[in-house]
Image: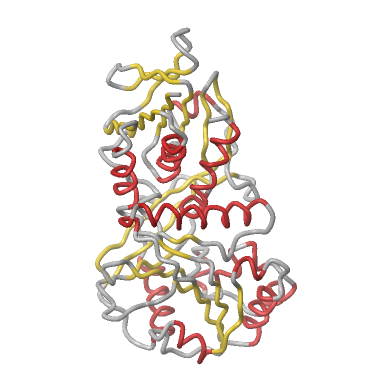
Amino acid sequence: MRVIVVGGGVVGTMHAWQAVERGHEVVQIEREAEARGASLRNFGQIWVSGRAGGEELDTALRARELWEAIGERVPGLGFRAIGSLTPVRNSRERAVAEAAAARPDAAARGYRLVTAEEARKINPALRGAFEAALWCERDAAVEPRTAQLHLREALKASGRYAFLPGREVREVLDNGAGPAAVRDDHGDVHQGDAVVLATGAWLSGLVRELVPDLPVRRVRLQMMQTAPLGEALTTSVADADSFRYYPAYTSRALDELNAGQAQAPIAAAHKMQLLMVQRQDGGLTIGDTHEYEHPFAFDTLEDPYTHLTEVVESFLGRPLPQIRRRWAGVYAQCTDTTRVVHRQQVADGVWLVTGPGGRGMTCSPAIAETTANELGW
C-alpha cells in the first residue's frame, strides 16, 4: 500500500509512522520547509493526568505506551518518564487534589496526594511555599522542537518513506488513476491507496472546500522559554488553575473551588493555567493562555507572562532565569471538546484527521494507530 500523508506535524508524522510500521510506503507532504505549527510550539508533555475518563483517558494511556516504545527506538525524541506535580496552597485546592486521588481510575493515571516534604523529595527544585501536591506518575515529556526531525530520520531509514517539504496540497483528484490522489502547488500529482489530511490548525483552503461546516475551531495560546535553570526540574509542574481547565478534576470540590476562590484577574482574563517542563538544555518551557475569539491578535501581551513568572517563582522559591523566547501558537480543537479528534472520510480514499486540541502531542500515536486500524492498514 502507498499512503500519502499531508501535514508534517506530530499527528501527520505519527500516521506516517504507523503506515511504515505496517510495511507500507509513505509520502509525507508539508507546505512549509519544516512544520511550524502547534507541534513545535507546545510543552512536549505526554499529559495523561488531566484527561477525561473513557475514550480520552484510554487514548492517552495507549499513546503513553506508544511514546515510550518509540522513544526507546528513537532516542532523539528525548522521551522522559518524569511524571508531574501540581502543588496546592490551601484547603480548597487540596480538596480538589484529594478528590482526584480518590477517582476510580486514579491508579491508571498514577495519582497520589503527597505532602510538601514528599513533593520536594520528588522534585527538589520546588523550594517555595505550598502545603501538598498531586503527583501524577504517568505523565512524561519529549522535545517538541526536534521530535519530528528525529522521527523522520528513523522513517527514512526504512527505505519506504519520503518527505516533500515546501509543497501545499491544493486539490483532491478524482481522475480514475487510483483510489486516491492529490495535486500540490507545484502541479505534481501524488497517487496512493489512501490519503490522510493531517493539516493541524490550517483549516482554510482545501480543508474548507472539502468540509465547509467542519466542527473544529482554532485556539491561540502564549508561551515562553527561559535560559537554563541551573538545576534539574525533575517533573513537569502545574498549578491549581489547571484543575479548572482539565476535565479529570471535575468534582464537587472543584465546584467549591470555583465558587469560593477566584482566579487572579489576569489568569481569568486570559483563561490561564501554569504548565512547566524543563527542556534537555535546562531551560523551562512555561505557559499558557487560551484565546478563542477570532480574529486572533497578531501580537503577544506581557501581563500573562508577568503572572506566570510570579507563579513559577513562588513554587521555585527563587527568581526565574532570563526569558529567552516568547511566542504564540494556534491549534485546532473539536467544538465538542469531549471528542478526542475529528476523523472523517472526505472523498474516496481520503480522510481528514484534525481537532485534537491540546491533546495533540499527548495522543497522536494512539490517534494514528486508530486511523490505521479503522482503515485496514
Residue 21 drawn at (x, y percent): 44, 38
Residue at 34 percent across and 60 percent down: it is: 78
Q: Quadrant of the N terminus?
A: top left
In the depicted view, which residue is nearer to us: 43 or 214? Answer: 43
Q: Is residue 162 left or right of residue 23?
A: left
Q: Position of residue 335 (x, y in %)?
A: 61, 45
Q: How is the image coloured?
A: secondary structure
Left or right: 121, with 324 as reference point: right
Instruction: Pick whichever, 347 or 263, lies toward us.
Output: 347
Position of 100 relative to 29 (above/below): below
Q: Is residue 22 above or below residue 331?
A: above
Taking 158 as reference, is 107 above or below it? below
Q: Position of residue 85 (x, y in %)?
A: 50, 76
The image shows a total of numbered marks equal to 0
* 315 shown above or below 277: below
Q: Nearer the viewer, residue 158 or 272?
A: 158
Image point (46%, 83%), residue name: 122
| Corner quadrant of residue 160 | top left
The quadrant where residue 48 appears: bottom right
| Residue 72, image x, y percentages | 39, 57
| Residue furthest to the top | 176
